[in-house]
Image: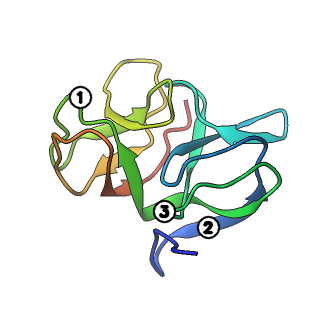
Amino acid sequence: MSEAHDAFSVIVHMTVTGTVAGGHFIENTAGVISQGDGARSAFGVLAQTEDAADGDTVPICVMGPCKVWANGTGAIAVGSYIASDASGHAVVDSTAGHRIMGMALEATSTNGVFIEALIYPSLG
């Protein structure tokens, strides 16, 4: 398994429900851990490059540097605030009321690539 984090990341290991793609945002809904589906629900990132299957226990980065799967339909610049889109991808987001999940440490305008990000979820 290729883990997409480093020694400074805060990692928890949890069992997922359903398939979760590597580097995608994760949500916890009433104890059910699944792939993120919106800008208000994410709490961490699947900290591995491989996909996880239903019932797998996986590393989840809840704070610190890790790789995220970026949706480059809009350019992501270094320093951009990122959040989860409806597919669990990292996207630029500064909308009031959305849960900002961190900051991009790498730039991309390519859809579907891993980029380095600093995860520090907002508490709102």
Please tell me whether residue 101 is drawn above or below residue 107 in the rendered image: above
Label 1 or label 2, whichever lies nearer to me, is: 1
Q: Which residue is mark 1?
A: 73
* Dot 1 and dot 2 residues touching (CB under 8 Å): no
Residue 64 horizontal/vertical position (percent): 45, 64
Where 38 sits versus 61, above or below?
above
Residue ID at (20%, 56%): 106
In the rendered image, which residue does mark 2 sit on? Answer: 11
Q: CA distance from mark 2 to mark 3?
A: 15 Å
Q: Secondary structure at mark 1?
A: loop
Q: Amino acid at mark 3?
A: Thr
Q: Where's residue 29, x and y in %?
A: 77, 32
The kind of secondary structure element at disc 2 is strand
How crowded is the residue under tag 1: few (<14 C-alpha within 10 Å), some, or many (20+)?
few
Q: Which kind of residue does numbered mark 2 sit on?
A: Ile
Going from N to C along the chain, the mark reached first, 1 or 3, is 3
Alpha carbon separation for disc pair 1 and 3: 21 Å
Q: Amino acid at mark 1?
A: Thr
Q: Which residue is mark 3?
A: 49
Disc 2: CA contacts within 10 A as few (<14), some (14-19) or many (>=20): many
The figure's colour scheme reads: rainbow
Residue at the far top in the pictured view: 96
| Tally of marks | 3
Does the CB distance between marks 1 and 3 fall below 8 Å? no
